[in-house]
Amino acid sequence: MSTLSNLKIILVEFSVNPYTFVLCNFQNEHDKIRELSQQLALEKKRSATYKRHLELIFEHIEEHNDSLSKKIQHIVDSVNEMETKEQQSHR
């Protein structure tokens, strides 16, 4: 009986306090949420940067397309003018 008594005392002394465990778990969850929130904020910034770069690229492409369209139109106009002059000279 003495051994059983000693065992009970040891078990009582080493028992885990449930409140400490919950608090520790909560702290770990809170830290994890904070870490994930920071990662999310970083990824949002990165995404915004990529989006802005893509917008700049599309603006550049659009400007280049406009420039090419004007050059092509100028060439078409010049060819039409030359054809008209050639037709007039053959009459």
Image (spheres, grey):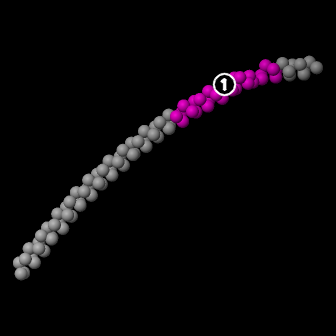
Q: Main secondary structure of the magenta part?
A: helix
Q: Position of residue 60 (x, y in %)?
A: 29, 51
Q: Is residue 51 above or below residue 61?
A: above
Q: Which part of the image, by quadrant, shows the C terminus?
A: bottom left
**In the shown orientation, is residue 50 left or right of residue 70?**
right
Q: Verify whether residue 2 appears in magenta.
A: no
Q: Position of residue 66 (x, y in %)?
A: 25, 57
Q: Position of residue 72 (x, y in %)?
A: 21, 64
Q: Based on the displayed image, in which of its 4 quarters is residue 7 positioned?
A: top right
Q: Which residue is mark 1?
A: 23
Say which element carries label 1.
Answer: helix
Q: Residue at x 61, y 31 (%)?
A: 29
Which of the pair 8/51 is nearer the observer? 51
Q: Is residue 76 above or below residue 38?
A: below
**In the shown orientation, is residue 45 left or right of residue 32?**
left
Q: Residue at x 57, y 33 (%)?
A: 33
**Amino acid of disc 1:** Leu
Which of the pair 26/3 is nearer the observer? 26
**In the shown orientation, is residue 30 left or right of residue 83?**
right
Q: Magenta segment, which residues?
A: 10-37
Q: Position of residue 28 (x, y in %)?
A: 62, 30
Which of the pair 9/25 is nearer the observer? 25
**In the shown orientation, is residue 11 left or right of residue 48?**
right
Q: Residue at x 64, y 28 (%)?
A: 26
